[in-house]
Amino acid sequence: MIFLLIVLLIIGSVILLVLAGAPLLFQVINTWMRRKEKTVARQLDRMFYEKNPKEILRLYFILPPILGLAGYFIFRSFLLFFLGIFLGLFIPNLILKIRDSQRRVKFNSQILDAIMILSSSLKGGLSFLQALEVLAEEMPQPMSQEIGMIVRENKMGVSLEESLKSLNQRMPSEDLNLLISSLLVARETGGDFTKVLSRLSTTIRDNRKLKENVRTLTLQGRMQGIIMSVLPFLFVWWVVNFNRHHFDIMFQSDIGRMLLVLAVILQIVGMFLIRTFSTIRI
């Protein structure tokens, strides 16, 4: 009887604590949701992605329990349960970052075509703003979206210099930075835009060709670095599959544990050095 009373008291205390903390918990969740929705909305607006931020926000509540329960029931592991929850919280941000990265890569690949259209429009007698309007109409997304934003901002009273600088901040790129800097300098000094664009297209094309040659020449070194980085982990996995207790002696002594920690540290240092030596910046 006393035991049943104690159990009832414990259950009642837990229920009271949950009821008392529920409003505070809901308030924290609502505050987080509002902040996250604003952040996601800004990211979607920057990418011109016509999607309701609440649809992205739902993934933060749908994916963690699904992946967590899948990891537990499939592999019967609490570690994979918590790992699934963590991945569920990380995946929506990863989706947005991948989409933004793909958009920037596509934008950067369109810069040379945009320069050619600008140069042709200026040679045809159009003003720079009119040439931008032609560019916004002729180019596909995302170039047309970004240039259209500049044209709309200019019509609303924003100076062309500020619009171009905003574009450089939204779409950070070495080629775009070179293009905008050249245009602003030519605009201030009264230079010939057509000549500037012609030389700029040649410079960007040569720069890309040089980067491609460097990437090709360093391919062997980068592949060796990847193989040497993965090889120790594959070796440990192979040994453990054949003899699960092969490394037990290392865990049973202080020297063995120290050597394992040292091996991991040296492996990380080696991976970093290989990546550093095989990377050539231009």
Image: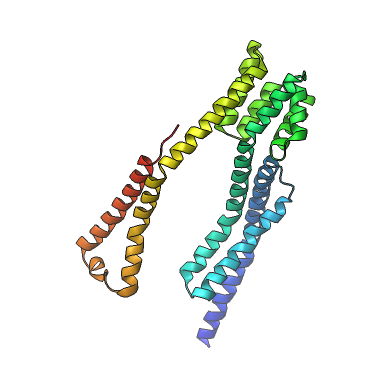
Q: Is residue 83 left or right of residue 193?
A: left
Q: In which image quadrant can residue 64 be found?
A: bottom right
Indicate the position of residue 13 as horizontal and vertical percent values.
57, 71
Residue in view at x 63 percent, y 31 percent? 112
Q: Is residue 105 left or right of residue 267?
A: right
Quadrant holding the C terminus = top left
The answer to whether any part of residue 86 appears in the image is: yes
Residue in view at x 56 percent, y 30 percent? 205
Whether residue 271 is situated above or below residue 247 in the rendered picture: above
Indicate the position of residue 187 as horizontal and vertical percent values.
66, 15
Most extreme residue toward the bottom is: 1
Front-most of residues 6 and 200: 200
Indicate the position of residue 250 as horizontal and vertical percent values.
24, 66
Front-most of residues 30 and 199: 199
Whether residue 90 is situated above or below residue 109 in the rendered picture: below
The answer to whether any part of residue 156 appears in the image is: no
Q: In which image quadrant can residue 183 be found?
A: top right
Indicate the position of residue 32 as horizontal and vertical percent values.
63, 51
